[in-house]
Every structure is written in structure tokens, then in C-alpha cells.
Image: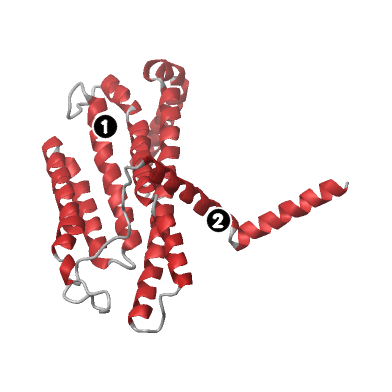
Amino acid sequence: GEGEDCDEYSQLWFYGLAYAHQFGAFFYDLPKYEEQYHLQSMVFWSILGLILFWTGIVVLLYMEIKAVTVQRERDERKKLVQARAMERCQALRELEDKEAKIMAPRAYITMSGAVVVWIGLVCQLIPFCHLLRELGFYVEVHGLCILFVIMNSFVLAACITLLILGLVWSCTRGFASLLFISLSILGDLMIFGGTLSVIIWGALTIAALWLYFSYLPSLYQDLKDPDDPNNGGYPWWLQDAGDFAIETELAKFGDAFKGFGQGVVSDVTDNPVGEKVKELGDHVTGNSATV
């Protein structure tokens, strides 16, 4: 039509056809790329890594949400006991023993979830080392791409774990949550600074967690007053994040995982959906036996 820019339309058609040609050429040369870059192997390890990554995330969320639920109930009962609205009867002690069994495997399950996240990231990223080498891209640790991936994926998995802890515990432990999230964000930034910055972040993270959750609580332990709702002179900004104990005795280790298995079964069955599925299964089984 009049006033239309034919050169602009020609350029658009040219770029469109050029991109279509490149897209088609990729599939035409796919067997060659497969032979050269092992694309099927890369896809397999990427999918496996993705499955492991989200499995670890689910494990972390399950255990930490369960720990937060238990801790919130403990906090509420503590307030009721301190207000003389509840007595520490035998039923309350039995409930506390049951909660202790639920929390016993927390350290192992949380750390296992973090390790699975790390392995998932490694499985997703290592196959690309071969591709980067073939394409001629420079890798920071030249010739040691696998080591580079393992180290940085470990830091990334640690940051993801700290972020999940911070988000989950933010509803009941504000200052502890702030520490977790701050360390996570700092790690995500330091990972771009190279090996030295990652080592500095690791040392800083270990020191900060030890200082906040171990050294300072032991330093102010004598100021705690269990009968005072404000914990006496204990610093209000110093908060725990639930039970996180690692047992060295094999018997206690086994009991912890046994209790965790029983808790998972209870969570699956003792809910409206699980009860309906169980009723349906019993009904089907009953009909089969009658026939």
C-alpha cells in the first residue's frame, strides 16, 4: 500500500526465513551433534538431576515445616503453662515425648535433603562441561570444569537450604530466619566472585551459625527463667530453630529413623484424603473377597 516501507518488510522476511533455516538445520544436523556432544546423555543426566533436585527440596520442606509445626505448638503450651492456664500433667509429658521422637531425625533428614539437592545440581551441570569444552568457552577453573561445578553447586545447594530454612521459620523465629536468609543471599552474590570469595563465605557462614546457635545461647544460658514469659534476662533477639541434634550412638540413630518412618506413615494415613483412600481400598478388597 501507499506509504508502506517495503525495505522494512523485506528485512523482516529475510530474518524470519534465516531463523527458520537455522532452526531446521539444527534438526537436520542433530545426528551429527549427538555424535559429537552426546546430547542424549546430557538430556538423561539433566532430567535425573532435576528429579533429584526437586526430591531434595520436597524432603527439606516436609521436615522443616513439620519441625516448625511442632515448635509452634511447644511455644503455645509454654505460654499456657507460664500463665497457669495449663498444668504439666502426664498427658502433656507423653505428648512432649512423642514430639521429641518426631524431631529426633530432623538433623539427618534435613542434611540428607540438602545433599540430594546438591547431587541434583551436579548431575544437571556436569554434562555441560563437555559441551563448553567442545564449543571453546573459557571456564574459570581451566581444565577443571568438573571441580568448578562441584564446588559452586555445593555453595548453591547450601544457599538454597538456608533460604528454605529462613522462609519456613520466618513465621515463628524472625531473627533466626533473618540470619538464614541473609547468609543465603550473601552466598548467591559471593559465588560470582571466584574460589576465594566462596571460601570466605563458607568460613563466615559456619562462624555466624556457630556464634548465633551455639556460643551465644550457652553464654546467656544462666539468664533464662522458665517461669518468666519473657525468659528473664535472656536476649529477646537470640532465638533457636528447634531441635537439631546429631546422635552418635547407633541405637539412637536407628530409633530416630524408625520414628521418622512412623511419622511419615501417620501423615499419609491420618488425614481426610488418606482416610478416604483407605476406605476405598477396604471397600474394593471387601467386594473382591465377596466375589
Q: Nearer the viewer, residue 159 or 137?
A: 159
What residue is pinned by disc 1? 149
What residue is pinned by disc 2? 266
Q: Is residue 88 left or right of residue 184?
A: right
Q: Nearer the viewer, residue 127 or 226?
A: 226
> What kind of residue is marked 1?
Val
Taking the spot 38% from the left edge, 36% from the top edge, the residue there is 120
Image depth: mark 1 or mark 2 in front: 2
> What kind of residue is marked 2?
Ser
Element under disc 1 = helix
Q: What percent of the width, then of the height, locates residue 245? A: 31, 51
Taking the spot 28% from the left edge, 25% from the top edge, the residue there is 132
Taking the spot 77% from the left edge, 54% from the top edge, the residue there is 283
Q: Nearer the viewer, residue 57 or 194?
A: 57
Q: What percent of the width, then of the height, locates residue 165? A: 32, 55
* Residues at circles 1 and 2 in contact by the CB criterion of under 8 Å: no
Taking the spot 33% from the left edge, 57% from the top edge, the residue there is 243
Number of residue marks = 2
Crowd rating for badge 2 (residues with CA inside 10 Å; few <14, some 14–19, many 20+): few
Element under disc 2 = helix
Crowd rating for badge 1 (residues with CA inside 10 Å; few <14, some 14–19, many 20+): many
